[in-house]
Image (cartoon, rainbow, N blue to C red):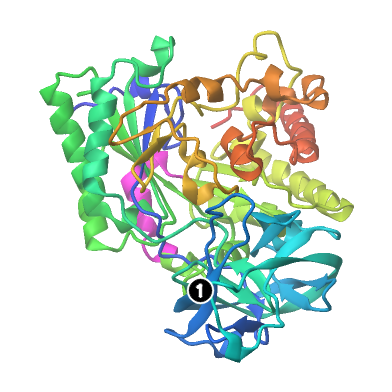
C-alpha cells in the first residue's frame, strides 16, 4: 500500500472533507435495508386482470398492474402493463388520508411517493405528506371492466385532492414490483423514496473507462482552480450500500493504482478511498477482507439516525425489523478499524425532533463516538409551531450535555464555525456551499454527472439529464461543471438570504433542488431551524468562553 498524503487530503472526523479532487463511483443502486413507505392492510391493489386485492393479501409472484415511471413522450399519458411482485414489506407507521374529487380515498404514509399531474400531463413524483388540497394526482380510471382488458388503451388520468385528513398509527404494508410502480385505491404510487431506484451493480468496464477519462485529462472538470485538481484524489464509493459489492470496490481500486502508476500520475501516491455504509455488513468475511486490505487508505462513514427508537423507524430490513441490533453486533469492529476517526452522520426529519437529545446521548455514551455529525434533511418537512417549540426544548438539553462532556465530544451542528452564522460578505457572494460542479460521479448507466445528487436515482423530475459526459464519449459537456459552479450565493439566493444575519452557516443542496424542481435555486426550508441552531450555538459558546480554562476536544 502506498503512502497517503493526509495533510493534502484534509480529513476530518474520519470522513473526507471536500478540498481536493473527489470522484464518485455509484457501485450499486441496491441496499440490504428496505426503508419503505406503506399503505394500510385493506388498501386495494389493482391486479393485472383489473381485479382488486387487499395489500396484506398480496404474495410474491402476484401479477399487479404497473406503469412506466418515466414520461417517454412529454405531455403524454402513461400506459399500464402487467408487473410482478418481487418483495413484500410490513412495519408500523402513522398515515394520512387523501380525499379525491372522484369520490375515492387513499390512506398512506406521508413519505410514500405519488405521481402528480400538471394540466393533462403526468409529470413528477411527490411525497404524500407534501401534497396540498387542490393538487392533481395520477389515478387509474376505475370504470374499466375486466372483460375489456386492453393495456394499449388503458391510460392513467388524474383526480384532484379536496381534503387531507389525519390517519392513525397502524401496521402498514408495501410491495416491491419489477416496474417499481403500482396502483393503490386507483392512485398511481411508487415503491420507494428514491423514485428511480432499480437494483443493479456498476459495470466494471464502465468504472475502468471512467478512471481512464479522469487520469488522462489534465483538467477534467474545466476549471482554472489548480488547487482543486492538484491535490490528493479521493475515490468515493456510494450505493445503495457500497459494502454490498466489496469485490467490485477492490477491483476498481486495483485498476486505479495500476493506471496511476502506468501513467506516473501525480495522484499515484496521493489518494484515499471513502465509503458510506449503513453499518450492517461488517460481519461479512468478504467485507472484512476488503477493509483490511485498504486499511490506512480507507475512510468509512456510517449512517446512524440516532437512538434505536428513531433509527429503527427509518432504517429497517425487509421483514420490518430495525437494523440497530445488527449494527451493534459488529460495532466494536468498526470502532477498532477507524480508531479516533470513528464518526457517524445522523439525518434528522420531523419524526426525529423529539429524539435529538436522546440520540446524541446514545451515540456518545452507548456507541462511544466523540465525533457526531448531524443534520436535518433539506426537503420541506411541513413543520408546525409545536415542532419548533420542541426543537428549542431539545437544543436546550443538547447544549447542556455538550458542555458537560466538552472534553470528549464534538457535535458539528453546534460547532463554532458551522453553527454560528453571519451576513453574506463580498467574498462569499461568488461562492457556493459545497463542491458540486467539481465532483464528477459515475452512475450505473455509464453516464457522468456533476455530483451524485444529479444521478437518476435521486432525480424527481422526468426527462431531465444533466450529465457531463459518459464512458463512451468522455467528458463532452464540461461546460455543465461550470454551470453548476456558477450557482453562487449572489446568483441564486432570495433577498431574505442575502440580508440574513446567519446566512453563512445556512447549507443548501444545489443538486437536490435541481432534481426536485428542474432548475437551480436555493432551498430555504431550513431557514427557521438554522436560526435556532445559531441561537443555541451562541448560547453554548458564550458559556464556554466565560470559562477560560475550558478546552474543547
Q: Is residue 288 above or below residue 532?
A: below
Q: Quadrant of residue 154?
A: bottom right
Q: From which residue to which does the magenta span run?
A: 327-343
Q: Nearer the viewer, residue 182 or 486?
A: 182
Q: Nearer the viewer, residue 68 or 165?
A: 68
User: In the image, residue 497 lies at what x, y percent?
Assistant: 78, 25
Residue 323 visible in rendering = yes
Give the number of callouts: 1
- With 157 as the anchor, is 305 left or right in this view? left
Identify the residue at the far left of this view. 262
Residue at image position (33%, 43%) is 446
Relative depth, front residue between 83 and 456: 83
Q: Position of residue 4 (x, y in %)?
A: 26, 26
Q: Residue at x 55, y 79 (%)?
A: 150
Q: Which residue is mark 1?
A: 81
Percent coordinates x, y for residue 349 in the rendering: 68, 53
Position of residue 95 relative to residue 357, above or below, is below
Q: Is residue 120 left or right of residue 250?
A: right
Question: How would you rate the neighbour count of disc 1 (Cα within 10 Å): few for under 14, some for 14-19, many for 20 or more?
Answer: some
Amino acid at each position: 500500500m502506498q503512502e497517503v498524503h493526509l495533510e493534502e487530503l484534509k480529513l476530518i472526523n474520519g470522513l473526507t472533507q471536500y478540498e481536493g479532487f473527489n470522484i464518485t463511483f455509484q457501485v450499486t443502486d441496491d441496499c440490504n435495508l428496505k426503508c419503505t413507505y406503506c399503505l394500510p392492510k385493506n388498501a386495494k391493489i389493482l391486479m393485472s386482470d383489473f381485479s382488486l386485492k387487499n395489500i396484506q393479501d398480496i404474495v410474491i409472484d402476484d401479477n399487479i398492474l404497473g406503469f412506466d415511471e418515466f414520461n417517454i413522450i412529454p405531455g403524454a399519458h402513461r400506459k399500464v402493463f402487467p408487473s410482478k411482485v418481487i418483495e413484500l414489506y410490513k412495519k408500523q407507521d402513522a398515515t394520512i388520508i387523501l380525499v379525491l374529487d372522484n369520490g375515492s380515498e387513499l390512506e398512506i404514509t406521508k413519505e410514500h411517493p405519488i405521481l402528480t399531474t400538471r394540466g393533462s400531463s403526468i409529470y413528477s413524483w411527490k411525497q404524500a405528506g407534501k401534497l396540498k388540497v387542490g393538487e392533481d394526482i395520477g389515478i387509474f380510471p376505475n370504470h374499466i371492466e375486466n372483460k375489456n382488458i386492453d393495456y394499449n388503451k388503458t391510460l392513467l388520468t388524474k383526480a384532484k385532492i379536496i381534503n387531507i385528513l389525519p390517519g392513525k398509527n397502524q401496521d402498514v404494508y408495501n410491495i416491491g414490483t419489477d416496474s417499481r410502480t403500482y396502483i393503490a385505491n386507483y392512485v398511481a404510487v411508487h415503491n420507494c423514496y428514491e423514485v428511480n431506484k432499480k437494483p443493479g451493480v456498476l459495470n466494471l468496464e464502465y468504472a475502468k473507462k471512467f478512471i481512464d477519462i479522469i487520469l488522462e485529462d489534465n483538467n477534467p472538470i474545466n476549471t482554472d482552480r489548480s488547487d482543486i485538481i492538484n491535490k490528493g484524489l479521493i475515490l468515493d464509493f456510494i450505493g445503495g450500500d457500497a459494502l454490498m459489492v466489496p469485490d467490485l470496490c477492490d477491483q476498481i481500486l486495483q485498476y486505479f493504482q495500476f493506471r496511476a502508476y502506468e501513467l506516473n500520475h501525480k495522484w499515484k501516491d496521493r489518494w484515499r478511498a471513502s465509503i458510506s455504509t449503513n453499518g450492517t455488513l461488517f460481519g461479512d468475511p468478504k467485507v472484512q477482507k476488503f477493509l483490511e486490505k485498504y486499511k490506512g487508505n480507507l475512510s468509512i462513514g456510517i449512517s446512524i439516525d440516532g437512538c434505536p427508537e428513531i433509527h429503527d423507524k427509518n432504517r429497517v430490513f425487509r421483514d420490518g425489523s430495525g437494523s440497530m441490533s445488527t449494527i451493534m453486533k459488529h460495532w466494536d469492529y468498526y470502532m477498532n478499524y477507524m480508531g479516533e476517526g470513528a464518526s457517524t452522520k445522523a439525518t434528522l426529519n420531523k419524526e426525529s425532533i423529539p429524539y435529538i437529545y436522546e440520540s446524541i446521548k446514545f451515540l456518545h455514551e452507548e456507541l462511544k463516538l466523540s465525533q457526531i455529525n448531524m443534520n436535518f434533511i433539506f426537503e420541506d418537512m411541513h413543520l408546525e409551531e409545536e415542532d419548533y417549540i420542541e426543537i428549542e426544548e431539545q437544543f436546550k438539553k443538547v447544549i447542556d450535555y455538550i458542555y458537560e462532556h466538552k472534553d470528549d465530544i464534538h457535535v458539528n451542528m453546534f460547532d463554532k464555525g458551522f453553527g454560528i452564522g453571519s451576513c453574506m460578505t463580498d467574498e462569499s457572494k461568488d461562492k457556493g456551499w459545497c463542491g458540486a460542479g467539481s465532483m464528477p460521479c459515475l452512475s450505473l448507466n455509464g453516464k457522468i454527472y456533476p455530483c451524485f445528487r444529479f444521478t437518476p436515482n435521486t432525480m424527481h423530475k422526468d426527462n431531465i439529464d444533466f450529465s457531463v459526459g459518459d464512458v463512451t464519449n468522455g467528458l463532452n459537456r464540461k461546460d455543465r461543471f461550470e454551470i453548476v459552479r456558477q450557482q453562487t450565493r449572489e446568483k441564486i439566493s432570495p433577498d431574505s438570504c442575502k440580508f440574513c444575519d446567519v446566512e453563512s452557516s445556512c447549507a443548501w443542496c444545489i443538486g437536490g433542488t435541481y432534481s426536485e424542481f428542474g432548475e437551480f435555486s436555493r432551498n430555504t426550508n431550513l431557514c427557521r431551524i438554522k436560526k435556532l441552531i445559531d441561537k443555541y450555538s451562541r448560547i453554548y459558546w458564550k458559556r464556554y468562553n466565560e470559562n477560560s480554562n475550558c478546552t474543547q476536544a
